[in-house]
Amino acid sequence: MNRVLVFAAVLLLASSAAFGRTYVVSSPDSKLSIEATLDEGRLNYSVSWCGSLIIYRGQVGFHVQGWDKAREWYLDKDAYPKTVTFNQPWKPVHGFKAEYPNAGSQIDIPLRAYTGERMTLQLRAANEGVAFRCILSEGFGGAKEYVLDRELTTFPFGRDCRCIFTNTPQGAYDVRVMSSAPSMSPAVVVELKKDAIYAAIAEAGSLEDFVPMTLRPVAVRRGTLEAAFRKGTVRVSGELTTPWRVIFVADNPGRFVENAYLLQNLCPPCEIKDTSWIQVGKVVRNSSCQRPDSDKWVDYNAANNYQFVHWDTGWNGTEYDSVPDHPTQIEGDRDLLGAIKYAHEKGQKFFLYCNHKELENYPLDETFKTYKQWGVDGVKFGFVNWETQEDMKWLHQAVKKAAEYKLMVNVHDNYRPTGWERTYPNLVSVEGIAGNECHDTFSAMPRSRIFMAFIRPISGMGDFTPCYLAPRVKSRAFQLACGVVFFNPLQYLHWYDKPLEPNQTAYPELAFWSAMPTTWDDTRVLAGVPGEYIVVARRKGQEWFISAITDKARNVDIPLNFLKTPISQSAAGGDYPVYSASIYRQNLNQPLECVIEKREVTSFDTITAYMTDEGGFNVRLVPMEQ
């Protein structure tokens, strides 16, 4: 028979006298709190926002194979709860802000069952959200090894709210009431309309010893979501620290994009002592894997402030051979080594694609050592498996192994980050997003893409693979905007395009990409409605880049009052700087084309974004010399 091991955490505002022992931590601004209650062996958690309950009497737990009785949990008499308050901002190696705030409180609650099992429940509260996880002691249950076959954690919201979600990381986004939603991949946004509050459920931490989480409605408890393993079970040996279950809360869904660093805050600091070799930027893809095309792209990059060239699948054989090609063989007459040398001579770095089967079937040490000898700067893992504990273990260990050889990593397809890039920042890019590769599916519907712009960034970086001249492009202004709207330190541009001449003049609006950074000092969502439109502003140094995308034709006013922090005295001697605004908008009569306009603006001005169906709008603001 099976027995159920249940650890539950509930957020409540009830008194300890009514419910037994209570342990609570609150955010620095006192708006958010998470509270755990121990009541006759039962452990619950509750979350409140500005005095109102958001989640009430939720559980945290797992079903353990081979056990037939639920555990009752009590405070461990040999230990004591520990509470810490911290304020430790930190600078990311590649971030969407120059420095990430990291302030809050955490309590560690040591628990023991009468049958001897021990665990620690950790609760954390920050201004951006709350989180909880469990640490299962070594030898848990008296066994050296045991299996968790499903998760029992619940998120009871108390009403049948609308959820915005996707089933798979590269799937379409949709919105449904909770009770009618299918299995959902985090992050999932929950609309708490009664109080004009939004919540977002995500997971954070290393998944090296775990399984990715999904969420699904509980049929017998309307308004409740439960966590589930994406695929398979979790085999445990030794102490196990589970991933964090994270609940963002905000009164504006744009805040989730601005506060996405919370997932990284929940991960350990960087394990790489010297990160100077981790350098990000803009990339072009050489899809032909032939030297002449590669050299053309390198020349274009050097003239237009791009930093990388990438060789895609095919350089070492057919990707889907029944026997995986060796990851260090070079097919035929492809002059890969000459291409790498030429790129380096022009000040460019080099990324190399390799299918996961090739990486998995041959020793990684031999592969990565050879790549380093060739001069490769980074490896793009293709079509990685991403659903089971075994998948996660291989992927995490491969990223660590790449760091030993000072190789950056880009993981494509369905893998989605969980903040672990803080610990191993050589993980510089992932896909896990329905970008341009999904142009002919429901994922590419305008509404889905605007939902995605609000929700996908919660999980972290995402490679939309913007392109510009390919036939699938409906709005070039939209494509320009994707480099700003979707944060990605290694920004792949011109994904489906053919090589351009270094000094091409046919598309002067590409100056927006030439000037655009890929990491930022500040990020703000200025306006938007999920599923309709979004306006994102990002700053690097003293320059601002503003981009908007929309589902259908609309005009959006963009007040520039966020510029009020003085950078220098204005030409008139006032307190606010004057900016030169380069505006890249759609030709409303020819929506595929871009028109460039220039004007001077200050923080008192408003710029109106005129956009057609599935359109975009872009502005670069540069302070004028005084």
Image (cartoon, rainbow, N blue to C red):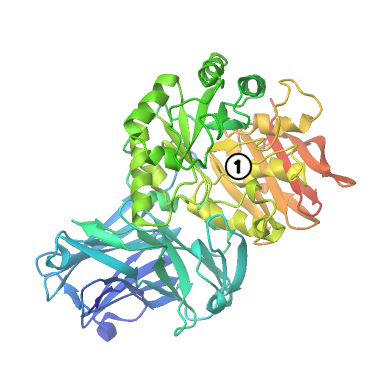
Amino acid type at mark 1: Arg
Tell me where residue 21 sits by quadrant: bottom left
Q: Quadrant of the N terminus?
A: bottom left
Quarter where residue 488 is shown? top right
Q: State how many labels appear.
A: 1
Residue 459 relative to residue 369: left or right: right
- The residue shown at (31%, 81%) is 15
Identify the residue at horizontal 56%, vertical 33% (top origin). Answer: 312
Where does residue 546 sit, x and y in percent of width and height?
A: 67, 43
- For this orientation, the residue located farthest to the front is 322
Does residue 595 appear left or right of residue 259 in this picture? right
Q: Residue at x 45, y 47 (%)?
A: 384
Quadrant position of the C terminus in the picture? top right
Q: Nearer the viewer, residue 73 or 492?
A: 492
On the question of residue 626 being in view, the answer is no
Write down the residue under mark 1.
Answer: 538
Q: Residue 279, position in %: x, y?
A: 47, 29
Q: Nearer the viewer, residue 546 or 186?
A: 186
Residue lying farthest to the top in this orientation? 345
Q: Nearer the viewer, residue 609 or 483?
A: 483
User: Residue 617: x and y, percent?
Assistant: 75, 45
For mark 1, give the secondary structure. Answer: strand
The x and y percentages for residue 207 are 35, 53
In the shown orientation, is residue 588 left or right of residue 173? Answer: right
Callout 1: few (<14), some (14-19), or many (20+) C-alpha neighbours within 10 Å?
A: many
Query: Is 323 situated left or right of 624 in this image?
Result: left
Residue most extreme to the left: 78
Determine whether 105 is above or below 412 in the image. below
